[in-house]
Image (cartoon, grey):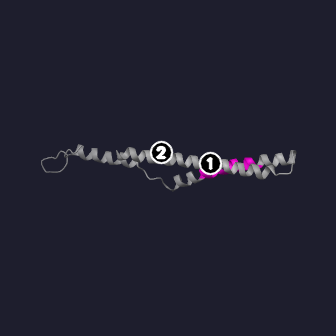
Amino acid sequence: MNKKPKKNPKGTPDFATQVGAKAGRKLKARRNATPGVWSGLGMMGMIGWSVVVPTLLGAALGLWLDKHYPGPHSWTLALLVAGLTLGCWTAWYWVAKESQAIRDEQEDDDE
């Protein structure tokens, strides 16, 4: 891999070598593209929705149960906490999976 680029009589690399080097740099830049602002906002949105949806569903189910089956304990509060717990676990799992994928990709690029 330590080949010296071909040079023309003037001592500069030939056209094919220059084009190949430029294409290689472009491919590497595409593989290692830094995520932009929109990507970060999208990730925050995914994490937010993965917490909000189970929490709201738990609260809605709890309200329905409290209305139809009243008891000494609040179903709303219990299912709200259960939904929040499930949502946080889902968000944690998703972030851990994405983080592992990024680490694996970086390790592949280093080799």
Q: Position of residue 4 (x, y in %)?
A: 19, 46
Residue 49 visible from this viewpoint:
no
Q: Earlier in the sequence, mark 1 or mark 2?
A: 1
- Check if residue 88 falls in the magenta segment: no
Q: Position of residue 17 (x, y in %)?
A: 23, 45
Residue 106 visible from this viewpoint:
yes
Amino acid type at mark 2: Ala
- Check if residue 52 falls in the magenta segment: yes
User: Residue 89: which disc?
Assistant: 1
As rendered, which of 4 and 17 lies closer to the eye?
4
Which mark's residue is nearer the viewer, 1 or 2?
1
Q: Is residue 65 left or right of residue 52?
A: right
User: Residue 19: which disc?
Assistant: none
For the N terminus, give its image quadrant.
top left
Q: In the rendered structure, which segment of residues is drawn in magenta? A: 45-59
| Outermost residue to the bottom | 37
Q: Is residue 76 left or right of residue 10?
A: right
Amino acid type at mark 1: Trp
Residue at 71 percent of width and 49 percent of height: 82
Q: Position of residue 54 (x, y in %)?
A: 69, 47
Report how far apart the C-alphas of labels 1 and 2 lie in the structure: 18 Å
Residue denoted by label 2: 101
Residue at 46 percent of width and 47 percent of height: 102
> Considering the numbered disc 1 on the image, is that residue within a helix, a strand or a loop?
helix
Q: Position of residue 27 (x, y in %)?
A: 36, 45
